[in-house]
Image (tube, grey):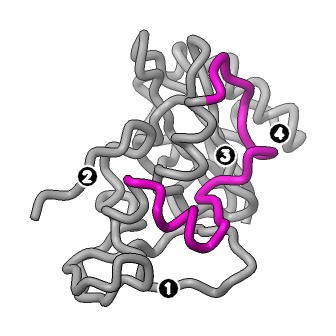
Amino acid sequence: MKLPIFKYNPDPIKLGVIIEEETICPVCEKKQNYVYEGPFFSEDEVEGICPWCIADGSASHKYNGEFQDIESCDDVDNEEFVDELIYRNPGYVGWQQEYWLSHCGDFCSIIDYVGWQEIKHIENELETDIGRLCEKYGLSIEEFKDILEINGDLQGYLFQCNCCKKHRLHADMA
């Protein structure tokens, strides 16, 4: 069975939040070959959710849960975008609280976990975000470049606008 397509997380397998592993989904109660391993905010401890129950919103509905905290998101122009992101889209795993960036009035798609080596070729495109992150963490641009590393003390999260394709960058410290 083909995995659902998620607007804001186009490759959840690459990000490690959906893995190929047999499960009995607690939502649909079907045997599935893929399972969600990312953040899910609910009063219930829930494991084994399948991607199809994320995509159709049934997992969020059954457990009154969210895949992303709306307080940890940029603003967007449409409430339907918010509903899709928090109720029908797999999250990503961050060091601290995951934060979702936006552009062109909609949420961006999470592309990958990154360090400086993975994004140095688009430094100019990310200049505003790099400046914001340097200010947030009290770092010079050189310090930022030196410590931004996948699984390092400062990890980056690369996003891309679904409309204009501009890249955005978020980062947090371990």
The residue identified by callout 4 is 139
Q: Nearer the viewer, mark 2 or mark 4?
A: 2
Tag 3–tag 2 contact (CB < 8 Å): no
The residue identified by callout 1 is 47
In which quadrant of the rendered view does residue 43 lie?
bottom right
| Residue displayed at 45% across by 39% down | 8
Residue bounds of the magenta highlight? 56-79
Q: Label 2 crowding class (10 Å Cα cut-off): few <14, some 14-19, many 20+?
A: some
Mark positioned earlier in the residue sequence (2 or 4):
2
The residue identified by callout 2 is 4
Mark positioned earlier in the residue sequence (3 or 2):
2
* Whole-percent x, y for residue 85 in the image: 55, 43
Three-letter code for the amino acid on which mark 2 is drawn: Pro
Residue sitting farthest toward the left: 1
- Please state which of residues 114 and 2 is positioned toward the viewer in this rendering: 2
Three-letter code for the amino acid on which mark 1 is drawn: Glu
